[in-house]
Amino acid sequence: MSAGLSHSGNCAAVLHTTTAPGSMAKMTVGLTPGTTEAYADGWFNIAGEGQVGNNVPYFRFFSGRLRVMDVFRQNISHELMLRISTPEGFTYTTLRQDVPTNSWHRLVMHVVPNGPGTNVQIWWDGRSVYAGTVSIPATTVDMVQLGSEHDQQMADIYVDDVIVTSGTGTPAPVPGPLPASKGDPSKPLNDFRGDGQAVVLAAGTLAADTVVRRGRRPARMTRA
């Protein structure tokens, strides 16, 4: 925990990882069994990036042991990227061209898992930067992770005001409006499962500058 740097309140969580063998920092939250949609909402401040070819993760969605999608900041190039694990390999989409370090940014992800018909919408600092249908090798998601599951993925990530929600009802449409997250960020993450999200803050739109890369992994990437 950090009492010196936070988005709101008096402290923020810190994920600190070095290049030392075994160094790893992550937080996870389980989702409602049989989840038909999930939201992950949080504020992030990347104070230190890692080596060339690596990235710094924000939210990662899992189905069992399989990471089906995540948003990360690529080291050196500073791009904000969406990565989808498809049956054919990885698909990469550039969401923003440059994300500076030592600054707070809000990321919201809405995921409606449904195999090849999975819907995803992403907001960055209140603006919809991606909305579309992707193909993943799973029909549900059961965990959201902050940080990396790999060791030696060097980074300093400050995290604050995180709320993760999920449910088994009829999913909200994609694209849709940015919801106002309900819940108390001072409570443990698992307390947020099942919270509703109804208040509209901004209309969602597909960003015009979205660029898609296809392949096993983009150039310069050595650590996922």
Image (cartoon, rainbow, N blue to C red):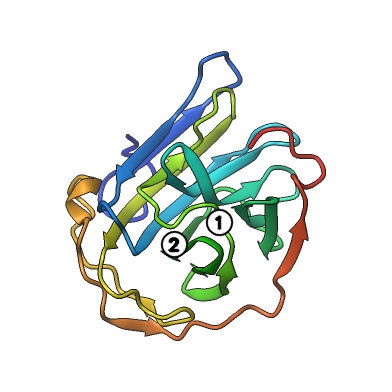
- Mark 1, residues whose alpha carbon is within 10 Å: few (<14), some, or many (≥20)? many
Closest to the observer: 60 or 137?
A: 137
Residue at 76% x, 56% y is 214
Please tell me whether residue 35 is drawn above or below residue 4 in the rendered image: below
Neighbour class for label 2 at 10 Å: few (<14), some, many (≥20)? many
| Residue 79 seen by the camera | no
Q: Which amino acid does label 2 sit on?
A: Pro
Quadrant housing the N terminus: top left
Left or right of residue 38: residue 129: right
The CA span between labels 1 and 2 is 8 Å
Residue at 69% across, 42% down: 75
Q: Do the residues labelled 1 and 2 touch (CB within 8 Å)?
A: yes
At which x and y percent is residue 170?
A: 29, 75
**Mark 1 or 2 closer to N-term?**
2
Q: Is residue 139 left or right of residue 199?
A: right
Quickly name the residue at label 2: 113
Helix or strand or loop: what does disc 2 sit on? Answer: loop
Residue 78 place in picture, x, y as percent? 69, 51
Decide: is 174 above or below 83.
Answer: below
Which residue corresponds to the image point at 23% horizontal and 54% vertical from the top-left? 185
- Mark 1 — residue? 136
- Outermost residue to the right: 219
Tell me if residue 52 can be seen.
yes
Q: Residue furthest top?
A: 21
Residue type pointed to by label 1: Ile
Q: In this view, does 174 lie to the left or right of 83?
A: left
**Residue 37: x percent and y percent?**
35, 65
